[in-house]
Amino acid sequence: MSETRRTYVPTEKQTRFIWAGNHITALEHIGAALDVPAATIAALRADHTHLGQLYAWRDNAVALGREYNRALDRAEWDLGGADVRITPVDPASLGDKQITIAPGFYKRLFANIDVIERNPKCTDEIKRQLFILPPDKPAPDLLALSAEVKAEFTGGLVVLKGRRPAPAKFWHILADRADGAGPQEAGTVAQAQFTDHHDLPDKPAAWTYTVELRTKDNTPVGKVSVVSITVWKGRADQGPEAGE
């Protein structure tokens, strides 16, 4: 797994640093149950503290910002080379005069998490406590889903366009062509578009389409969309007409 693309890790540096602190704090409480050595946790805590000092010193030393950013890049990711050593611009007001941190803090942290995730004792609940299980996506409001269909007359054909929001997999279309037959099956399509190839009437008639969202097991879901458009054989192409 890529060290820089974990689903549970924020991308922004400061937010990622806060996440790491939350993870280590939780690990200090439940790490023993997961067979994580106390020395490993203590080392991660020390590195996290030192990384925090680097952030504080960088934020208080604008003139040395570029140097601090280079040091942070190495402290966070680089496993090669010598330890990172930084002296703050004003050590009298910022605590220790110099800190040392081994390069690659996040690589070491993620390597430990990889071991934890392979541990059979590491349940989903523990992963949530350790901030390494992404939150569940909220379930869609199935009653509010809609195809939001619009109809247009183009190329001598009626074309329906709209949306197919998950978990819908199909459009099921009924067409009432004002011929006295009432709504008739017009088709089922997987894409959010339908072209009606039915012959056009000789005189203007309002064709009404009802589009129903269906799941992969053909279960109706959400609200039906109804749209009407007036067509006849002599009608010239024109733009869409809004539906409900």
Image (cartoon, rainbow, N blue to C red):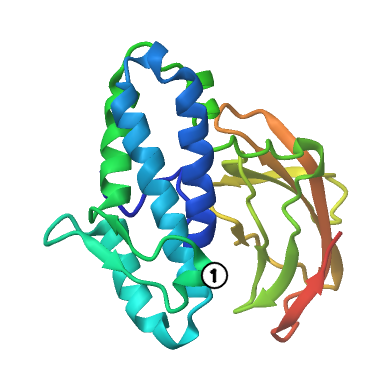
Q: Is residue 98 left or right of residue 208?
A: left
Looking at the image, is 121 positioned above or below residue 178? above
Can you identify the residue that label 1 sits on?
A: 93
The kind of residue tagged 1 is Ser
The foreground one among 21 and 153 is 21
Query: Under tag 1, what secondary structure?
Result: helix
The answer to whether residue 52 is visible is yes
Q: Is residue 120 left or right of residue 145?
A: left
Task: Report x, y in % for residue 51.
Answer: 40, 56
Residue 110, quarter of picture: top left
Counting labels gives 1
At horizontal 38% and vertical 43% (from top left) the residue drawn is 46
At horizontal 55% and vertical 32% (from top left) the residue drawn is 216
Looking at the image, is 211 positioned above or below residue 199? above
Q: Residues within 10 Å of mark 1 (few under 14, many from 20)?
A: few
Task: Report x, y in % for residue 3.
Answer: 28, 50
The foreground one among 12 and 161 is 12
Task: Report x, y in % for residue 8.
Answer: 46, 43
Task: Report x, y in % for residue 227.
Answer: 82, 60
Q: Is residue 79 left or right of residue 33?
A: left
Looking at the image, is 119 positioned above or below residue 129? above
Quadrant of the frame with the C terminus: bottom right
Residue 37, quarter of picture: top left
At horizontal 32% and vertical 69% (from top left) the residue drawn is 86
Q: In the orientation shown, which residue stands out farthest toward the front? A: 92
The foreground one among 77 and 168 is 77
The answer to whether residue 132 is visible is no
Quadrant of the frame with the N terminus: top left
Q: In the orientation shown, which residue stands out farthest toward the left? A: 81
At horizontal 38% and vertical 11% (from top left) the residue drawn is 121
